[in-house]
Image (cartoon, helix red, strand yellow):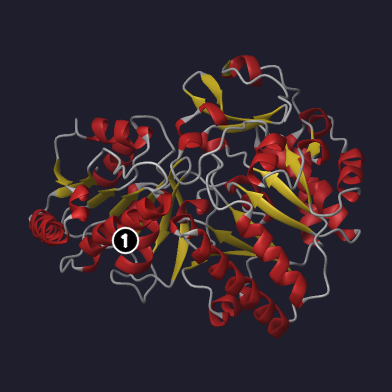
Amino acid sequence: MTTIGSKEKRLVQEVLGNIQAVDTQAVRKMLTNELVDLNKKIIVLDDDPTGVQTVHGISVYTDWSVESLERGFEEENAMFFILTNSRGFTAAETEKAHTKIATNIVEAAKKQNKEFIVISRGDSTLRGHYPLETEVLKGTIEAALDIQYDGEVILPFFKEGGRYTVDNIHYVQYEEYLVPAGETEFAKDRTFGYSSSHLGEWVEEQTKGAFKAENTTYISLESLRTLDIETITNQLLQVSDFNKVVVNAVDYVDVEVFVIALIKAMKSGKQFMFRSAAALTKVMGGVSDKALLKREELIQEETNHGGLILVGSHVKKTTEQLEVLKTGDFIEFIEFDSHLVLQPDKFQEEIDRVIETTENFIRSGKTVTVYTRRERLDLGEGKKEEELKLSVKISDAVTSIVQRLTVRPNYIVAKGGITSSDIGTKGLQVKRATVAGQIQPGIPVWVTGEESKFPGMAYIIFPGNVGAVTTLKDTVDILNN
């Protein structure tokens, strides 16, 4: 594989400061006109609950039954989310789930007599079951319907998290620097690691050479910023054989211009699958901007109880944010010795201890942070799936804290994708939630449904890899002041 482009970290201002400005109002007007005629239900399959981090007023269903999908199709909104939590699955579990999801989507669509678009919302730092998920979706849907997917759009841009694609290289922002994604801690993920930052090379790496970087279509910032919609549309019209389309983007306007061309290509009969971060869903769903949520919008039922913060994510950013949170003076901290998972009896004793202590603090009006041991459990080489299964057991234990609570916290914050998914679906027993908006950029808030353990509660889903070191403390301060 040839190396394409610079892979060194670069100053943010150096990269983003010289990009051509564009008339955003004109673009927004063109986009609105195109979306009016789209007339397809957008179904976002979210591999953990953080994918709603750019939207508001949108439903999230926590199962993929035909009944839930039909409810989604019947909504007035152009888009709804299905939480798959597949980033916490093994490859076999993911394949089985996505086969079922695609089958049920087709059944619901036929019952409702509606066309649809499927977006596979994945991590903006490129971790997850790719290309497995979109390949299973493609194969299952094509076998059931008379359609053929021409290509797949790759768009991991996510401004709120500092994820930018420039010259086809995907970057992660660290303070004043942009670091190629392949050079970050996320690329060293034990389950979903990778080495390529150039997205064409990343596709080639992930597909084990089945799709080549040289056959990938690249949508350049130059074309987007000069509003060369005709060229971009023609590029999309040439895509075939499920080859990939990499979209460069440093701001929402780039995604908006791309979607204008995309809809034109789709109206000409082209069919695309999507693997994207959260920005594309906001644009394609026609979701308006909304100010960050304030405390009075979040706490609908005041109690004299404390809040509950659960920290499961092990990425470096989460640990740094936890350390800053510990400088606060109104929170009690409980370390959960998650490594005892290797000793079942002691593990159960530890769970019981944490739950009893947590409940007593919340009832007395104190906010509690429960966090797992910060060291990763390391079983050695070649044990990825075993480690994933143990991490699920640990997540189940953290989830049981919420399951066994007999007192209603004032709010719940969950840190980390797998953690927040399990707490939402198993702990809070949410079947359908509404996204209220964001408490901080990229940090979504669900309002739990009537069927849940604590109806109408603000449930803050805090991704492991989002925010500055102070953002977790800032978020908790908002909820407590």
Quadrant assignment, res 303: bottom left
| Left or right of 438, for residue 74 | right
Number of marks in picture: 1
Badge 1: residue crowd in 10 Å (few <14, some 14–19, many ≥20): some
| Left or right of 253, for residue 360 | left
Looking at the rendering, in which quadrant would you find the C terminus? top left
Quadrant assignment, res 458: bottom left
The amino acid pointed to by label 1 is Gln
Q: Nearer the viewer, residue 252 or 417?
A: 417
Which residue is situated farthest in the bottom direction here? Answer: 111
The spot of residue 417 in percent (x, y) is 41, 51
The residue sitting at 22% across, 42% down in the picture is 373
Q: Nearer the viewer, residue 3 or 258?
A: 3
Residue 435 appears in the figure = yes
The residue that mark 1 highlights is 300
The spot of residue 196 in percent (x, y) is 62, 32
The residue sitting at 37% across, 37% down in the picture is 315
